[in-house]
Amino acid sequence: VPMIRSYHQKVLDHYQKPRNVGTLDKTDINVGTGLVGAPACGDVMRLQIRVDENGKISEAKFKTFGCGSAIASSSYLTELVQGMSLDDAGRIKNTVIAKELSLPPVKLHCSMLAEDAIKSAINDYQSKRLKAGKAPTLGP
Ligand code: FES
Ligand code: FES
């Protein structure tokens, strides 16, 4: 496929060998699940994080039903957030992902899916903690 050749090598690497594909137990109080869709194309990304007692992300898993750039964006994101505080992870901008993977402009929304997914996972984690009567874990 000629179009594929124009893609940066880092995208291809994450697309061909995606990191951290999988599922965490979403009933676990330490796990947050984000599920988001891209209005532009209907692709869907599920991102899950496990948060340790210090408010840092100790594990991240994803499943993405979408294009190669969305898969690569989520794969890269799961590596990026390892060890991050929730505050820092919540501030990740899609442009950081797009830059790292050298995504072309038409694929910017694919990295936006990853930004939305981490925010959604953090919100889910925090609201689960609140419902369970536990204080949200705030990162240092
Ligand atoms: Fe959905 Fe990219 S348009 S796969
Ligand atoms: Fe829609 Fe990539 S997420 S084309």
Image (tube, helix red, strand yellow):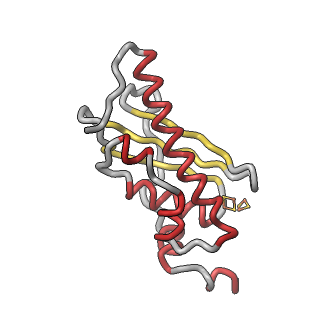
Could you tell me which residue is drawn at 29 percent across and 49 percent down? 83
Location of residue 8 with respect to 31 vertically, above or below: below
Side (left or right) of 78 relative to 3: left
- On the image, the x and y values in percent for residue 17 come to 47, 68
Location of residue 3 with respect to 76 vertically, above or below: below
Ligand 1, seen in the image, is in the quarter at: bottom right
Could you tell me which residue is drawn at 69 percent across and 86 percent down? 2
Quadrant where the image shows the N terminus = bottom right
- On the image, the x and y values in percent for residue 90 come to 44, 44
Quadrant where the image shows the C terminus = top left
- On the image, the x and y values in percent for residue 67 come to 66, 62
Number of numbered tags placed on the structure image: 0
- In depth, the one of 54 and 24 nearer the eye is 54
Could you tell me which residue is drawn at 41 percent across and 15 percent down? 132
Side (left or right) of 49 relative to 33: left
Q: Quadrant of residue 25?
A: top left
Could you tell me which residue is drawn at 46 percent across and 41 percent down? 48
